Amino acid sequence: MKEFPELADITSAAAALAGIAHETPLEASATFSAMVGQPVYLKLENLQKTGSFKLRGAFNKIRLLSATEKAHGVIAASAGNHAQGVAYAARQAGIRAVIVMPETAPLSKVSATRGYGAEVVLAGASYDEAYGRAKELSAAEGLTFVHAFDDPAVMAGQGTIGLEILRELPEVRAVIVPVGGGGLIAGVAKAVKSLAPQVKVIGVQAEGADAMVRSKAADRLIQTPTAVTIADGIAVKAPGSGTFKMVRQYVDEMVTIDDEAIASAILMLLERAKLVVEGAGAIGLAALLQGKIHASGPIACLISGGNIDVNFIARIIERGLVKAGRRVILTTCVVDKPGSLQKLLSCVAASRGNVLYVHHDRIQHDVPLGQAKVQISLETRDSEHTAEILAALQREGYQVTIN
C-alpha cells in the first residue's frame, strides 16, 4: 500500500467526487482584503456537504475498499467532521459505519453523525482516546479503519481542494490551511506544489494543539501532552507519521494562533461575511488578520468547516460584543422613591443607549437605607459610545461602575 498520494491519485479522487462533493466557492472578500492589505479569497468548505471538507477524503477511501472490506463495514474515530464524512460516504456505499467520538464532542456533531446512519460510540475525553477505542473495535469486529488524516487515500481526497483553488484562482500566491493531524494540508500541499511550486503553502495550528508545528520545527514527530483549544476539529496531540513527512517536504511555513483570535475571527466571519464557521475553519483567517502570516496576494484562505454548536456561537457573540465595548453592564445607586429609576433610564435613553434589562434591588446588605442598587445591561455602538453614556450619567451625579 502507498504511504503517500501522488498527483494522479488526487486527480482520480477529483473525478470520483464529481457529483458527490460540491466544488465549493472561492470568493473574494473586500473586507478582509482591506484589513490585510492583500487580495484575500475564502475557499468555503463550510458549504460542503456534511459541513466540512472531510467528506472528500472519507469518500475516496471508502470507494477504494475491496468488496470484502465493504461487506464488513468501516469504523472511524473523530471529534465530529470526519465522523460525518465517513457516515455520509458509508451511506452512499450502502455499508455499515461505526464512529467513535470523544465524550466531549459537540452534541450537534453527534446528532448529525447519527442522522447520516452511523452507529455512534462515545469514548474518552479526546480524539486520541477515541482513536484507541476505535482501533480496539476494528480488531474485534473486523471493521476497516478509516483514519481521519494519516491515510494516502484520505489525503488524496482532501488534496482535491488544492486542484480547485488552482483552477479557480490560477494567480494565487499563497494558500493558508488549518492543521490538526495534517491530512488536509498534506493533500492540498501535494496538489499545489506539484502543479504550481511557486505558490506558498502555510499551515496554522492552535497554540493549545500545536504538535505539527513543534514536529516541523524539530524535524521529528512530537506528541504534546494535551490538545486544548476551542477549535475542536483540530485538537490532536500527535500528527500522523505520513502527514508529517508530507508537511516536511511540501509545506513552506507553520504558525500558531491563540483561541481569543480564533473566536474573534468566528465572530467577524459571521458579522462581516455572513458565514457560519467553526473554530478550525476560522483559524487560518485568524492568523492572517493577526499578522502571523506575511504573504503576497492573492491569498486563498481555506475555511475548512462550519459545524459549530449554536450555543457556542451565542457565547462567542456575547463575549465579542463585550470585548468590543458594544455590550456593557452599569451599576449605580438611586434614591428609593417613585420616579428615580425613570430619571436614570431617561438619561441613558438621551445618550442613545439601548437597555436590554434592568435589575432593581433595595434589600441587599450593602445598599444604604433609602437607596436602591440598579444594574443596567446596555447595548451600545462601541466603547466610545459607552464612555459617552458613562460621562452623561456622571454629569447627572450618578456614581457608576462598569461590571
Image: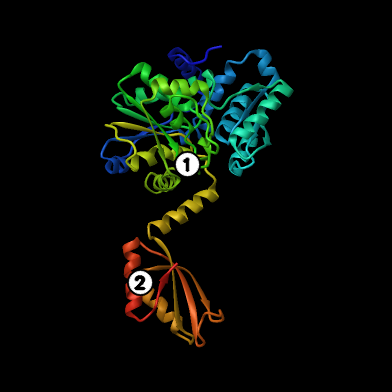
Which residue lies most toward the right here? 140
Name the residue at 27% across, 36% down: 38
Question: Could you tell me if residue 276 is visible in this image?
Answer: yes
Amino acid type, residue under disc 1 in the picture: Gly
Above or below, 348 against 34 in this view is below
Residue at the image position 50 percent from the left and 49 percent from the top: 313
In the image, 97: left or right of 345? right
The quadrant in which the N terminus is found is top right
Residue at the disc numbered 1: 279
Q: Tell me where residue 13 appears, x and y as whole percent.
A: 49, 18
Query: For the residue labelled by badge 2, is the local secondary structure a helix, a strand or a loop?
Result: helix
Expressed as whole percent of the image width and height from the top left, the position of residue 169 reads: 32, 26
Residue 390: mark in rendering: 2
- Residue 112 falls in image quadrant: top right
Q: Residue at x 45, y 14 (%)?
A: 6
Rendered image: mark on residue 158:
none
Which badge, 1 or 2, is on the more N-terminal residue? Answer: 1
Q: CA distance from mark 1 to mark 2?
A: 35 Å
Amino acid at dot 2: Leu
Camera-side residue of 325 and 242: 242
Q: Residue at x 54, y 20 (%)?
A: 151
Q: Is residue 326 left or right of residue 132?
A: left
Asked whether residue 18 is in view, the answer is no
The one nearer the camera, 52 or 224, is 224
- 159 in relation to 352, above or below: above
